[in-house]
Amino acid sequence: MKVIEIRRHSVRGAGAHLNQKGVDLARGAGNAMKRPARVITSTLERAFETAIAMGFAVDEQYGLLATMGDGVSAEIFWDSPYADFSAKMCAGTALSHFAEELEALIGRIAADIPDEGRALIITHGGIVQTIAAACLPGEDLSKLGGPPSYCEGLELYFEEGKFAGYKAIRM
């Protein structure tokens, strides 16, 4: 089984960078994690710095993981619970188009990691929930609870190229 671990970035200060609390939180999370075969972040500093503070070198960065965009943000607030993203997923909306792009990216990442391998994605609130809604259609995402806090997210499991389950990651 392949695993893709998707987490929200750690705590930042008043600017774009992590503060000491964020570095400490990310370091603790990284110490408790299995080593990923690939580490992918958004192009924003706080995501990149979270991966480094976790103890992992970053292999790739994607702009798609950096922002939901104005169209999606007009449809749903980034800090909404997982289930709200699933409920608002309607064909033709900005959210559904964004979800399709994210699902395709997740599929490519899963295809590129070895069997029994693991990838780590560090992104942002709203994007974590959109990935869950995109990759787990029909699932009761209320089981995942409210929005992910810092360094929280979910694990997606893949078998034979298909989504095979998930688990919430809480700190």
Image (tube, rainbow, N blue to C red):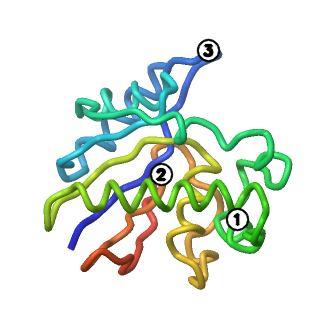
Which residue lies at the image location 50% right of the left edge and 44% below the top edge?
Answer: 8
Which residue lies at the image location 21% right of the left edge and 49% below the top edge?
Answer: 36
Q: Splitting the image into 4 quarters, where does residue 50 fall?
A: top left
Mark 3 packing: few (<14 Cα in 10 Å), some, or many (20+)?
few
Cβ atoms at labels 1 and 2 below 8 Å apart: no
**Label 2, label 3: how many angstroms apart (C-alpha)?**
21 Å
Which residue lies at the image location 33% right of the left edge and 34% below the top edge?
Answer: 60
Q: Is residue 49 above or below residue 106?
A: above
The disc labelled 2 sits on which kind of residue?
A: Glu
Mark 2 falls on what kind of element?
loop
**Label 1, label 3: how many angstroms apart (C-alpha)?**
28 Å
Mark 1 falls on what kind of element?
helix
User: Residue 61 in the image: x percent, y percent?
Assistant: 40, 33
Give the mark, 1 or 3, whose residue is nearer the N terminus: 3
Look at mark 1 in the image and give the residue it sits on.
Answer: 85
Mark 3 falls on what kind of element?
loop
The disc labelled 3 sits on which kind of residue?
A: Gly
Q: Out of 67 and 80, give the one closest to the viewer.
A: 67
Mark 2 packing: few (<14 Cα in 10 Å), some, or many (20+)?
many
Mark 1 packing: few (<14 Cα in 10 Å), some, or many (20+)?
many
Look at mark 3 in the image and give the residue it sits on.
Answer: 15
How many labels sit on residues?
3
Give the mark, 2 or 3, whose residue is nearer the N terminus: 3
Image quarter hosting the N terminus = bottom left
Of labels 1 and 2, the one closer to you: 1
Q: Residue furthest front?
A: 92
Q: Is residue 45 above or below residue 80?
A: above
Give the mark, 1 or 2, whose residue is nearer the N terminus: 1
**Label 1, label 2: how many angstroms apart (C-alpha)?**
17 Å
User: Residue 79 in the image: x percent, y percent?
Assistant: 71, 50
Look at mark 2 in the image and give the residue it sits on.
Answer: 152
